């Protein structure tokens, strides 16, 4: 990272600041908004939807913004999104001044929906901006971006609870709004205006084709179910912990347990996915861990003990382990399945799979808190946990069935290491006398050593420069090798060598 220019460093700082603030918008209010809403007479079934509506808007709007980003411009979309999110955060902090039930909940929905419009615009534009500004370092910079997203989600409830104790309900939202305003000013002055991408590149209908791939759909379903478990706790954990007498800061630290465990253990699961090859097994293990977690957090009705504080803590730790296992493996499985089914291994395919990952996660994050609020009001926390346990069991069983009857991806496709490719071509170059490093670069062979796909911090920041290549009898790839600094696919190494001969 020491090779970055001053402009690139400023860009990275500005976008990561906005990423951190936008992620905090999702989780900041979890420790204290439910109690504030109940003071106005709002039941859990209604304020749970306030949490979920944010993700539903992101689910629908992200593909729309992605389709029109060339017309709007990445910089303009990013700045509008950041400014809108910051403004809505401040407005959300003024809701405590409203005393009546229906005005409070209606305005909560309106502000949250507009905030989600801004956040989805930002999240769509930030990825395009990083790819444009760091074309030869995409994997590292995108991973950095998602680290700040993860940090925002993790520390959001803790910082929110702390500021709530210090300055009351408005304080967390005012501070968050100011952070986003600062980030917006930085991006206005730092980011260059990007030229539109080549409009001749078409991906119409490709999403529908990818959705027909069984492995991709299985991964999308797995991500959705995992996100449901996260959203479920977001809406119910605070009221579930009230008998223990924790203040907002204590509740905030309880929220950080699962997210912190995820952040710490995600690289471990990535290493396991890389070494074990079949990362769908990791997804099954993650499902079993999440089932165990909700059995303890409730605890489930079949556990003959009351709710115990230490069991909740242990359950949250296990939940973080399971979430890390499923999210790290989910993106890997989807992209491998798409490429193995014949889709080009290029940025176009990656963009569609990444968008599907985001939409799947957002869908689960909407369903989770929405259903959680209804079940919590109707049957209480212990029985409500059975919903997540049953859903996760179905997902684990489906994944195992898929592995047994349909999965032929991981054991039949070899990855051609970049170092080995360079060494092989360099060796043959001595005898052929025609291929050199410049020609290799011109043909789209990445010079940078790729990061392990499953080993990155979060699933969606995974390998941009690595490749899952089609079977080869000669040791070289027989499908196009992508140049991830552009939006086009280049001929394979084998084709290049034949041409040079």
Image (spheres, grey):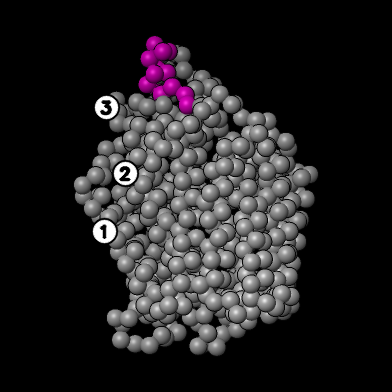
| Residue 447 magenta | no
- Residue shown at 26% from the left, 49% from the top: 402
Badge 3 marks a residue whose secondary structure is loop
What's the mark number on residue 375? none
Point out the tag, 2 or 3, that comes first from the N-terminus: 2
Q: Observer-nearest residue: 441 or 369?
A: 369
Left or right: 202 as drawn, with respect to 95: left
Q: Observer-nearest residue: 388 or 267?
A: 388
In the picture as drawn, the residue positioned furthest to the left comes out as 405
Residue at which label 3 appears: 473
Q: Is residue 116 visible?
A: yes
In front: label 2 or label 3: 2
- Residue shown at 45% from the left, 84% from the top: 309
Left or right: 21 as drawn, with respect to 59: right
Marks 2 and 3, how far apart at CA: 26 Å
* Label 3 Cα crowd, 10 Å radius (few <14 / some 14-19 / many 20+): few
Marks 3 and 1, how far apart at CA: 35 Å
Badge 2 marks a residue whose secondary structure is helix
Q: How would you classify the magenta stretch by its main secondary structure?
A: helix
Q: Quadrant of the C terminus?
A: top left
Point out the tag, 3 or 1, that comes first from the N-terminus: 1
What's the mark number on residue 397? 1
Residue at which label 2 appears: 214
In the picture as drawn, the residue positioned furthest to the top comes out as 501
- Residue shown at 65% from the left, 30% from the top: 196
Residue 411 picture quarter: top left
- In the rendered image, residue 470, in percent from the top left (x then y), is placed at 33, 31
Magenta segment boundaries in residue numbering: 489-501
- In the rendered image, residue 442, in percent from the top left (x then y), is placed at 53, 22
Badge 1 marks a residue whose secondary structure is helix
- Residue shown at 37% from the left, 27% from the top: 479
């Amino acid at each position: 990272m020491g090779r970055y220019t001053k402009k690139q460093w400023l860009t990275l700082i500005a976008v990561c600041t906005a990423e951190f603030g936008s992620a905090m918008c999702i989780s900041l209010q979890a420790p204290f908004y439910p109690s504030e809403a109940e003071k106005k007479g709002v039941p859990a079934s209604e304020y749970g939807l306030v949490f979920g509506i944010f993700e539903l808007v992101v689910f629908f709007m992200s593909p729309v913004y992605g389709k029109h980003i060339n017309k709007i411009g990445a910089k303009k979309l990013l700045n509008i999104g950041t400014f809108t999110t910051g403004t809505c955060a401040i407005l959300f902090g003024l809701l405590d001044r409203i005393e009546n039930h229906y005005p409070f909940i209606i305005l909560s929905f309106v502000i949250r929906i507009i905030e989600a419009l801004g956040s989805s615009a930002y999240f769509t534009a930030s990825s395009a901006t990083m790819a444009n500004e760091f074309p030869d370092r995409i994997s590292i910079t995108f991973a950095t971006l998602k680290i700040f997203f993860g940090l925002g989600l993790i520390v959001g409830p803790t910082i929110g609870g702390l500021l709530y104790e210090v300055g009351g309900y408005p304080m967390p939202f005012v501070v968050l709004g100011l952070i986003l305003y600062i980030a917006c000013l930085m991006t206005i002055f730092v980011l260059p205006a990007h030229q539109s991408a080549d409009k001749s590149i078409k991906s119409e209908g490709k999403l529908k084709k990818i959705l027909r791939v069984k492995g991709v759909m299985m991964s999308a379903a797995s991500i959705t179910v995992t996100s449901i478990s996260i959203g479920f706790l977001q809406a119910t954990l605070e009221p579930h912990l009230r008998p223990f007498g924790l203040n907002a800061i204590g509740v905030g630290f309880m929220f950080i347990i699962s997210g912190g465990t995820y952040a710490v253990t995600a690289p471990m699961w990535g290493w396991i996915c890389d070494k074990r090859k079949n990362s769908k097994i990791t997804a099954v293990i993650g499902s079993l861990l999440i089932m165990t977690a909700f059995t303890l957090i409730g605890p489930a009705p079949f556990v003959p003990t009351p709710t115990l504080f230490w069991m909740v803590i242990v359950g949250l730790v296990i939940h973080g382990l399971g979430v890390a296992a499923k999210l790290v493996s989910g993106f890997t499985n989807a992209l491998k399945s798409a490429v193995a089914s014949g889709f080009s291994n290029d940025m176009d395919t990656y963009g569609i799979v990444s968008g599907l990952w985001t939409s799947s996660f957002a869908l689960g994050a909407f369903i989770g808190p929405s259903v959680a609020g209804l079940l919590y009001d109707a049957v209480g926390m212990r029985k409500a946990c059975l919903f997540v346990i049953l859903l996760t069991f179905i997902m684990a069983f489906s994944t195992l069935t898929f592995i047994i009857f349909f999965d032929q991806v991981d054991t039949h496709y070899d990855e051609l290491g970049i170092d080995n490719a360079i060494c092989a071509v360099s060796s043959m170059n001595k005898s052929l006398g025609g291929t050199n490093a410049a020609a290799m670069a011109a043909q789209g062979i990445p010079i940078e050593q790729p990061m392990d796909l499953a080993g990155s911090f979060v699933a969606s920041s995974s390998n941009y420069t690595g490749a899952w290549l089609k079977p080869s009898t000669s040791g070289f790839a027989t499908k196009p090798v992508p140049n991830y600094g552009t939006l086009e696919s280049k001929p394979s190494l084998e084709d290049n060598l034949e041409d040079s001969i």
